[in-house]
Image (cartoon, grey):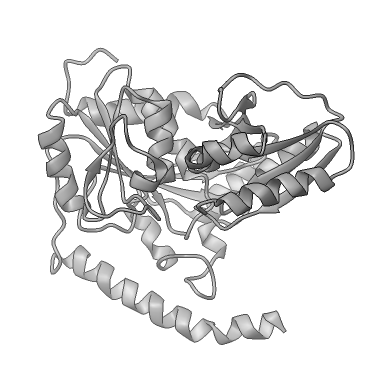
Amino acid sequence: MLKYLSVLLYPFSLLYGLVMWIRNRFYDKGILTAVEFDLPTIACGNLSVGGTGKTPHVEYLIRLLKTQFQVATLSRGYNRRTSGYILADQHSTAADIGDEPMQFHDKYPDIHVAVGEERMLAIPQLLMDEPGTQVVLLDDAFQHRSIKPGLNIMITEYNRRFTKDHVVPFGRLREGRAGYARANCIIVSKCPPEMTLAEKTAIEKEINPLPHQQVFFTTLQYGTMYDLITHEPVNTAATTTVLLACGIARPEPLLQKLRNSFKEVFLLPFPDHYYYSGRDIEKIKKELGDLPGENKIVVTTEKDAVRLHLLKKELAEQNLQMAVMPVEIAFLFGGAETFNHYIFDYVGRYYPATNQ
């Protein structure tokens, strides 16, 4: 039945794809203009509606660049409870700037984090507020054509590559597959760490990169869990029963990681970018209590953690400990050195005197 219903969505997918094609052609032909800025601007985004692992890739760029340059991130601030341009400060919360920007702000206090729906206007404001900014990372800006970034990084998920997907609502693409041509480099994310060279070659052939494009492959690496409130490391035995409570687009990789590490793992899903309530905390506590075993723990993601911080009082009242699972990306097939040089070569065009 669901198969037939999805087929009914295909005409709407074609219509939406046509609208996006016309819009992109207007930008390509100069009918709609895109603004360029006289400093390195790196856009990191995707063709799909989410779940490609974009955030840990942005964090990789932050860590790579911030030791040599003053880095700023600019995001839309999806699902925040404010609007307009905001530069994060010590009083900012996820409700003010969104969960992903808040995650950047918490983890990397030595960079500037800003949000603004109209990024064409937000960048000049950011540069006025922080004139020492040397590199701007545009988070999730692949479809934001009013800005022409100097470097466009497109991420596609290994298990749902854009080459095999369709435009919404029939599929998950925000525009037609041809949009990949705007990318300077393409990253295939969430690859299995044991991926073979033969499979890598087959996927590269499937993507069929243009002459100006490079293709990289990354996998997820999970770190040591830490307490959501105290940030102290949380050490748990393999016999501990785990309740994964999270609101992210694709919890499957983390779920699999936990199942590889613990005997019993249960999932309590919430919508992507979900703002938890006091009742949700009570629900999580009850779900945990109903699980089998003596040793039990709730695990969540870093993105959820910045939203759950808004409920520190409720967590304390319920005496509910939550462990946060950090995640980073790692390049496969020795791609890290090539990618790092690729990024520094681009930024170095603006700052040739910088020692790299």
Picture coordinates of residue 238, whole percent (x, y): 83, 27
Q: Quadrant of residue 184?
A: top left
* Above or below, 27 relative to 225: below
Q: How many numbered callouts?
A: 0
Picture coordinates of residue 128, whole percent (x, y): 10, 36
Q: Is residue 306 left or right of residue 325?
A: left
Question: Hey, which residue is sitting farthest right in the picture?
Answer: 293
In the image, 104 versus 188, the foreground residue is 104
Q: Quadrant of residue 249?
A: bottom right
Q: Residue at x 26, y 71 (%)?
A: 23
* Above or below, 172 relative to 70: below
Viewer can see residue 44: no
* Above or below, 207 relative to 71: below
Q: Residue at x 18, y 47 (%)?
A: 122
Q: Quadrant of the C terminus?
A: top left
Picture coordinates of residue 197, whole percent (x, y): 64, 37
* Above or below, 154 relative to 330: below
Q: Residue at x 45, y 23 (%)?
A: 337
Q: Is residue 203 left or right of residue 254?
A: left
In the image, 67 versus 332, the foreground residue is 67
Q: Quadrant of the N terminus?
A: bottom right
Viewer can see residue 268: yes
Q: Residue at x 53, y 55 (%)?
A: 272
